[in-house]
Amino acid sequence: MPSFLCIYFRKETKQTQGGRQGMPIRMPDLMRKRIIQITLEDLRSFGIRGLLLDVDNTLASHGKPEPLEGVEDWITFMREAGIKMAIISNNDSARVSPFAKRLGLPFVSKAMKPLPSGVKRGIHLLGLPPDTIAVVGDQVYTDVMGAHLAGTKAVLVEPVDEYETWSFRLRRRLERGVIRRYRRMHGEDA
Ligand SMILES: [Mg+2]
């Protein structure tokens, strides 16, 4: 694990901007099982006018060219409601570009989340203030942390695929405490 992430583990870094006083940067602002369960009301409750969407395990199964069922309708609905959207993925453009084209969205590939630089490129694409944007993704230590380091909000969704690899199990183990704490704060069914 990169050393800068270990620093965040040890120091439980706090973020103070955007009304998140005292909250660790790894704590999502909102959790939903699937991206299509995010509603306009959810976004309005946080003052969100733009979304930066992760691809693998958020909009689609890992590596799959087609979006999850309901995603295209959800994007059309959000677009017509005035929500600006772009795709932001750590994957390369060979994966991200055709997917973004299919959904009619601009994209940032090789975003290197949790580093804030890729998220900032996404913010620039949307042309909105960072605190009116949320990154939506399935990983605490890339999507959520990258969002907060760049000054945006973060929505965590459950990963679509459950891998049985050691790295996936480690990741889920590391994320478990964050998810438990979120559920304690927001209620078990959140
Ligand atoms: Mg992902």
Image (tube, helix red, strand yellow):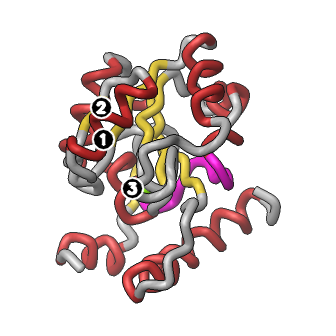
Sequence order check: which comes first, mark 1 or mark 2?
A: 1
Q: Nearer the viewer, residue 5 or 38?
A: 38
For the residues labelled 1 and 2, say whether their Cβ atoms are less than 8 Å apart: yes
Q: Is mark 2 within 8 Å of ligand 1?
A: no
Identity of the amino acid at label 3? Answer: Gly
Residue occupied by mark 3: 63
Which tag is nearer the camera, tag 1 or tag 2? Answer: 1
Q: Is residue 55 left or right of residue 33?
A: left
Identity of the amino acid at label 2? Answer: Phe
Looking at the rendering, the quadrant in which ligand 1 lies is: bottom left
Sequence order check: which comes first, mark 2 or mark 3?
A: 3
Label 2 crowding class (10 Å Cα cut-off): few <14, some 14-19, many 20+?
many
Residue 23 visible to an observer of this rendering: no
As drawn, the residue found furthest toward the front would be: 65
Q: Is residue 59 left or right of residue 36?
A: left
Residue occupied by mark 1: 96
Residue 168 locus on image (x, y percent) = 44, 78
Q: Nearer the viewer, residue 88 or 102?
A: 102
Magenta-span inclusion, residue 6: no
Residue occupied by mark 2: 107
Residue 26 locus on image (x, y percent) = 44, 62
Q: Is residue 58 left or right of residue 114?
A: right
Q: Main secondary structure of the magenta part?
A: loop
Q: Which residues are magenta?
A: 26-34
Residue 127 locus on image (x, y percent) = 32, 17
Label 1 residue SS: helix
Distance from Cα at disc 1 to Cα at disc 2:
7 Å
Sequence order check: which comes first, mark 1 or mark 3?
A: 3
> Looking at the image, which residue is at 22% across and 32% down?
121
Is 38 drawn above or below residue 137 in the view shown? above
Q: Where does the N terminus fall, quadrant-wise?
A: bottom left
